[in-house]
Image (cartoon, rainbow, N blue to C red):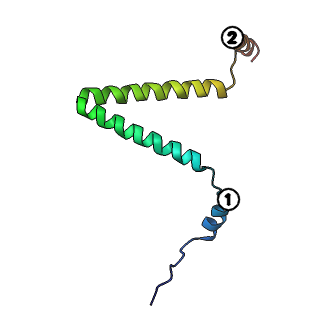
Amino acid sequence: MTAEPVDHSTSLAVSERRKLRKSLRRIDMIFFLICALVGLDTLGQVASYGAQTFTWVVVLGAVATAALLSLWLTRRLPTQSLAEGEASGAESAAHP
């Protein structure tokens, strides 16, 4: 007497599931595993040095994340030179 699994998916869930595709290959998963092991090993080493070291690791991680995010945003967002910004601001103030 085996019970068959009951599927409680909605039609929206089924239609969305069809759009999904596998994007991570075997090599990606291997590198992910290596990064996870190195990260856990580093966390263990940091924990043995005390709370102050752990705090510095968190702070440096936040700074590195902010730097990478800033770099990514400056590459993605359109830029406007200072002279163009001042000129357009002056023109809009002069011509209401």
Say which of 19 and 53 sits in front.
53
The relative height of residue 32 versus residue 46 in the rendered view (above or below) is: below
Q: Secondary structure at mark 2?
A: helix
Find residue 56 and report its horizontal and vertical position in percent.
32, 25
Specify the label residue 86 is tagged with: 2
- Residue at 41%, 37% (x, y): give it: 38
- Is 90 situated left or right of 39 in this image? right
Find residue 70 and report its image quarter.
Answer: top right
Q: Quadrant location of the C terminus?
A: top right
Say which of 25 and 58 sits in front.
25
Find residue 23 and report its horizontal and vertical position in percent.
63, 50
* Dot placed on the residue nearer the N-terminal end, 2 or 1: 1
The relative height of residue 37 versus residue 51 in the rendered view (above or below) is: below
Q: Are marks 2 and 1 in contact (CB under 8 Å)?
A: no
Find residue 19 and report its horizontal and vertical position in percent.
67, 59
The relative height of residue 66 versus residue 8 in the rendered view (above or below) is: above
Say which of 50 and 18 sits in front.
50
Find residue 92 and report its image quarter.
Answer: top right
Q: Type of residue at label 2?
A: Glu
Q: Type of residue at label 1?
A: Lys
- Residue at 44%, 90% (x, y): give it: 1
- Is 69 situated left or right of 48 in this image? right
How crowded pointer 1 is (Cα within 10 Å; few <14, some 14-19, many 20+) is rated as few
Find residue 69 and report its horizontal and vertical position in percent.
54, 29
- Residue at 63%, 63% (x, y): give it: 17
Specify the label residue 29 is tagged with: none
Find residue 16 and report its image quarter.
Answer: bottom right
How crowded pointer 2 is (Cα within 10 Å; few <14, some 14-19, many 20+) is rated as few
Query: Which residue extends farthest bottom?
Result: 1
The relative height of residue 38 versus residue 16 in the rendered view (above or below) is: above
Residue beneath label 1, please? 19
